[in-house]
Image (tube, grey):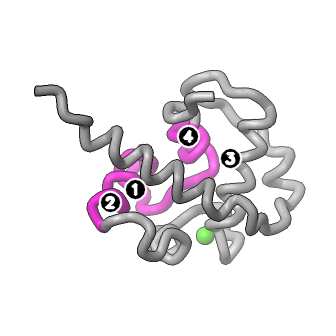
Amino acid sequence: MAAPSLLTTVLLSVTMGFRSVMAVGRPVPPHIAEAALTTTKPVSEAKLNEMKQDFVDVDFNDDAVMDAQEIRAHFQRTISNLNFYQFFLDCDTDNSGSVSLQEYANYASMIDNS
Ligand SMILES: [Ca+2]
């Protein structure tokens, strides 16, 4: 029995969550726009810019990390608690309790299917 894995479900939900708010688009500050990022999987420049936009949209207080409260506020009821925790655990690879742009870029590059 090959049911879709939990991770697949999480990733689909998270990706759709981000896409749905892409149109909001807070201005991307220069230090984010020009940040040199590495990604676990290679991605296009356009995709990198999309990730930066996602990041800025979530980082309301501009402290250069997405914390749990910001991610929660951003997604509101669009993802379940379980997906939320899984997303956080998967992104926050250094277990700092928040997600940096670099951590998000690594994560997002892994779920990029384009
Ligand atoms: Ca923040």
Instruction: Give the image quarter of residue 109.
Output: top right
- CB under 8 Å between discs 4 and 3: yes
- Secondary structure beneath disc 4? helix
Q: CA distance from mark 2 to mark 3?
A: 20 Å
Q: CA distance from mark 2 to mark 4?
A: 16 Å
Answer few, some or many: residues within 10 Å of disc 3's Cα (few below 14, many 20 plus, some between 14 and 19).
many
Expressed as whole percent of the image width and height from the top left, the position of residue 45 reads: 80, 32
Query: Does the numbered disc 4 mark a residue whose Cβ is under 8 Å from ligand 1?
Result: no
Q: CA distance from mark 1 to mark 4?
A: 12 Å
Which mark identifies residue 108?
4
**Residue assigned mark 1:** 88
Residue lying at 72% horizontally and 37% vertically, measured from the top left: 47
Question: Which sits earlier in the primary sequence, circle 4 or circle 3?
Answer: 3
Which range of residues does the magenta coloring cover?
81-108
Answer few, some or many: residues within 10 Å of disc 2's Cα (few below 14, many 20 plus, some between 14 and 19).
some
- CB under 8 Å between discs 2 and 1: yes
Quarter of the picture holding the C terminus? top right
**Residue assigned mark 3:** 51
Q: Residue furthest left?
A: 1
**Residue assigned mark 2:** 85
In the image, what residue type sits under mark 2? Tyr
Instruction: Give the image quarter of residue 2.
Output: top left
Q: Is residue 94 above or below residue 112?
A: below
Q: CA distance from mark 4 to mark 3?
A: 7 Å
Along the line of sight, the residue nearer the viewer: 55 or 65: 55
